[in-house]
Image (cartoon, grey):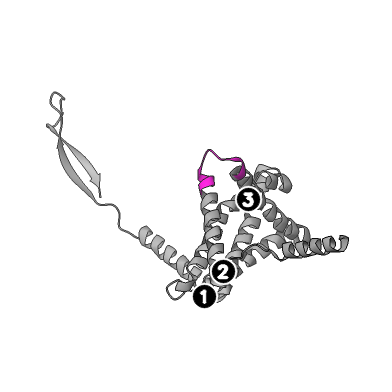
Amino acid sequence: MTRKRSTAQKSNRGSRRKISLPRIPLTPDQQLDIVGYVLLSVAGLTLLSFLSANQGEIPSWWLGTLRRGFGWGAYLVPLFVGAAGLWLVLREFGDRLPELTPYQVTGVLLGYLGMLATLHVPATLGLFGGDSQLAADEGIGGGHLGAFLSGQLDDGLGSIGMIVVLVTWWLIAVALTFRVTLREAADGWQLLLGKMRSRRAAIASSPPEHRRTVKVPRPKGKPSPDSDLDRLVIRT
């Protein structure tokens, strides 16, 4: 009898183990669509939480985490998350979407990181007396990520070296994002400066202001030495 009970218990355990929850079959495209919708929802809720004055516990915690992590750059996080979600949802219409290369994505990420490091330096010096960690804890400047990047550059290269690296960083980010070479960027900058100089020269060499006399009747009851009309000089 004991053997029969043991075998019955084993068979019951085996049948329990074999029972599994039903799985919903999803194709890789459907999984990417779900991820895209989730990213869009997160981006929308984050943006609305930034704009809302009354926030719950979870949105307050989420926004505080973003501010401490990215500082002033936290306001761009929902844009990036929403752009990624929108691309996943609309990836099937790739021929109608603007072409986005991996180099451009790398340029945007480099630009964002460079912005955090660049913003954190003057914010720390101007508002917190050089205390980088305190500024990051308060969500000012570039947050903890900007404090880490600027601190590593300052400790390793010094102030002058940090400035040189940040300028080079920005040039590389612009070149990758807009798909231009440094030579083309320099030529465009020189062209812009030339237009500004030519405009200033045209303004400086313009003829003096023209003047014309207009007679305006004076109000009644007010005496006039010459006539009831005064002469006004209007510049054109």
Residue at disc 3, secondary structure? helix
The residue identified by callout 3 is 66
- Dot 3, crowdedness within 10 Å: few (<14), some or many (≥20)? many
Among the two numbered marks 2 and 3 on one chain, the one whose residue lies closer to the N terminus? 2
Q: Which numbered circle lies on residue 26?
A: 2
The answer to whether 129 is drawn above or below residue 12 in the figure is: above
* Mark 2 and mark 1 residues within 8 Å of each other at the beta carbon: no
Residue 175 visible here? no
Residue 133 visible here? yes
Whether residue 211 sits left or right of residue 96 in the image: it is: left
Whether residue 209 sits left or right of residue 108 in the image: it is: left
Residue ID at (77%, 65%)? 11
Q: Which quadrant, please, contains the N terminus? A: bottom right
Among the two numbered marks 3 and 1 on one chain, the one whose residue lies closer to the N terminus? 3
The residue identified by callout 1 is 184
The answer to whether 8 is drawn above or below residue 216 in the figure is: below
Q: Nearer the viewer, mark 2 or mark 3?
A: 2
Does the segment drawn in magenta span residue 197?
no
Kind of residue sitting beneath label 2 = Leu
Give the distance between the C-alpha atoms of the residues marked 2 and 3, in whole angstroms: 32 Å
Kind of residue sitting beneath label 1 = Glu
Whether residue 94 sits left or right of residue 129 in the image: it is: left
Q: Nearer the viewer, residue 222 or 100?
A: 100
State the image quarter where residue 107 is shown.
bottom right
Bounds of the magenta span?
48-58
Give the distance between the C-alpha atoms of the residues marked 3 and 1, in whole angstroms: 36 Å
Residue at disc 2, secondary structure? loop
